[in-house]
Image (tube, rainbow, N blue to C red):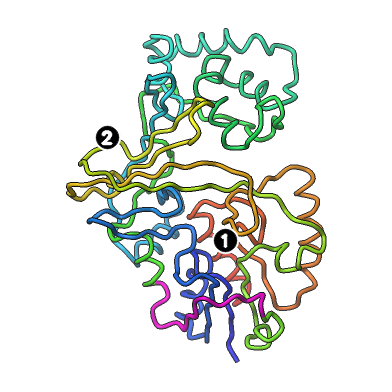
Amino acid sequence: MYDYLIVGAGLFGATFANLAHKKGLKVLVIDKKDCVAGAIRSERKDNIDVHLYGPHIFHTSYKEVWDYFCQFTEMNNFVNEPLALYKGKLYHMPFNMNTFNALWGVVTPEEAKNKIEEQKKEMAGKEPTNLEEQAISLVGRDVFEALVKGYTEKQWGRDCKELPASIIKRLPVRFSYNNNYFNDRYQGIPVDGYTAVIERMLEGIEVKLGVDYLDNKDEYRKMAKRVIYTGEIDKYFAFQLGHLQYRTLRFETERLEMENYQGNAVVNYTEREVPWTRIAEHKWFNYRESPVTYITKEYPKEFEEGDDPFYAINNDRNNNMYAAYKDLASKEEGVYFCGRLGQYKYFDMDDTIYEVFKLFNELEK
């Protein structure tokens, strides 16, 4: 009899397993894939750490989370400074004074603020009813057209006029020349990749890969006092209330016979006509010399069975369905539905670890 059976060897499952193991509890981790680390998995190729499921930059303002994560790796000093390419011109993200200078030629924060306020007037006295109107009410027409519209429509597969205003309740705007995408105090990437971090978290813990909990749910449930389930909540219940909807991504990774493809870790492509949303060049996340480079293009798409679910579509239809599944889950004694798939919401990596801390402390107090 295990104290905990943990379903999923991603960041949530590995963190919970590590905390339980350190407390002397008996733990079994299973994962239906034949490898650990889930969506943050990385692999080293030609001396380059390739992020298999899109770029992952660890950033947090929680010192306890940073200190915990750094037990398992040395962190580099990477600072995320993505660029956006629109009609052959590069702009800094998030929207800052460098962005506004490139768009309008303004130099001072006052000039930029005046330009935005002038453009926001087209929404004066109107309550935004869709994403396009919401974006214009926040940053004006020019920023919306160049840097929001095409990217968002590709990401969600719908025209901005068809998307709810609630998707962008706010847009990050800075009236400084600071290009650091995140405001968090701590930021970096593991010098030996994310997979190595997860492997260290799981040291000394029994792990079985290529095992699908749902194939034999009742038998696995008998093996442990408690189950930490990080898979899809609707799949656990055999979709009896319907399918929760997700957006997913298709990744196209290429090895290029050149040292430098784009000179930056991430470049967003904000024109609707370009089919991918961004290109990551992996060597810039954790630079090591290599005569070649690896890039990954990201193509958003509708989720289909067999795809990895990435982004919950938190509209009224799905949120109501999730609430009903959550009610079912509350009746599953000793089973805890966790993480972005179990809780049907997006979590940054630091929030994932923080959620583990809260749950573990609650269960073991």
Mark 2 residue type = Gly
Q: State the mark number for residue 263.
A: 2
User: Residue shown at 72%/29% (left/top)?
Assistant: 162
Mark 1: amino acid: Glu
271 relative position to 242: left or right: left
**Residue 136 rendering spot, x and y as whole percentages:** 62, 18
Q: Where residue 152 sits: x, y (%)? A: 58, 31
Give the magenta part as a residue range.
201-215
The question of residue 288 being in magenta is answered with no
Q: Residue at x 58, y 81 (%)?
A: 4
Work out whether residue 46 or residue 126 is closer to the camera in this orientation and state it.
46
Q: Give percent across and percent down for residue 98.
A: 37, 20
Q: Check disc 2 and report its element: helix, strand or loop.
A: loop
Marked residue nearer the N-terminal end (2 or 1): 2
Quadrant including the N terminus: bottom right
Q: Is residue 332 above or below residue 84?
A: below
Tell me the residue at 44%/70% (across/down). Answer: 35
Residue with the mark numbered 1: 355
